[in-house]
Amino acid sequence: MVALIAGNWKMNGSLSANEELLGALAAGLQGRGAAEVALCVPTPYLAQFRTLADRHPALQAVGLGAQDVSAHAGGAYTGEVSAAMLRDFACRYAIAGHSERRSYHGESDELVAQKAARVLAAGLVPIVCVGETLAQREAGETEAVVKRQLSAVIHTLGHCAGEMVVAYEPVWAIGTGKVATPEQAQAVHALLRAQLKAATPHADGMKILYGGSMKPDNAVALLAQPDIDGGLIGGAALKAADFVAICRAAG
Ligand code: PEP
């Protein structure tokens, strides 16, 4: 399967910083391998990405993504951004259920599932994040937590479940520098794959990304695992050399 490396800039960037970062990425990504690359940028910068992609052909192959989306189609939802608006900017991806949305904004499994459904209905691909906290892992609840989170999305998407990308992001590894070992990550990815297999005939072709302090020095071992099909990259996506190195490690 072709790997997917998706950067998540979170709430970072500025017009000038983005111009510099995207210019460096365009240079670094030239002549790279087969891995798919995506960048989930803050919503105000979607248009800037499009403009810069016209200037740097290497960016044209990068899938543009959003970091969140409204669960509603449109209307009186001040501050929200609909999936159709993301489509206007030729977005290919939208993240749903990042742990920072779940924990800081109280997003439930059901809300995340509705967001994923909106993304799919607009013709984009949802990157649905699941993952346990440290307390949940230590209490032996990892399997139950990720299964519950994924199950809500599978239930809502129904026969379209095979069209999403799943990202396993242990909350204790996000932005902490504590990365899951390849064995720990693979064990959860295998569980998720089995759950997807029970729900859709397309499970073997679905991408399950790992996210949580993925860096150039640990990417190769993580990406070598049979059920790890790419990465969702936070901090390292803000450094062109690191992000390019991870993309190259992915093939
Ligand atoms: C993320 O935010 O999805 C993430 C994986 O962040 P980091 O790579 O910084 O841990």
Image: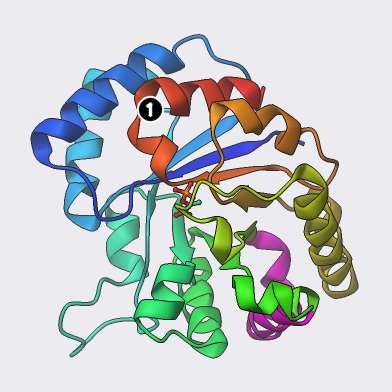
Q: Quarter of the image containing the C terminus? A: top right
Q: Vertically, is 48 above or below 201?
A: above
Q: Main secondary structure of the magenta part?
A: helix
The percent position of residue 250, horizontal first and vertical second, equals 65, 27
Tag 1, which secondary structure? loop
Q: Is residue 154 magenta?
A: yes
Q: Quarter of the image containing the N terminus? A: top right
The percent position of residue 85, horizontal first and vertical second, equals 27, 64
The percent position of residue 189, horizontal first and vertical second, equals 78, 57
- Disc count in the image? 1
Q: Vertically, is 120 above or below 235?
A: below
In the image: residue 86, left or right of residue 195:
left
Of 215 and 198, the residue lying toward us: 215
Q: Quadrant of residue 139?
A: bottom right
Residue under the image location 15 percent in, 84 percent down = 78
Of 147 and 78, the residue lying toward us: 147
Q: Vertically, is 53 above or below 145?
A: above
Q: Quadrant of residue 129?
A: bottom right
Residue under the image location 53 percent in, 62 percent down = 126
Q: Amino acid at mark 1?
A: Gln
Magenta-drawn segment: 144-164
Give the residue at mark 1: 60
In the image: residue 156, left or right of residue 203:
left
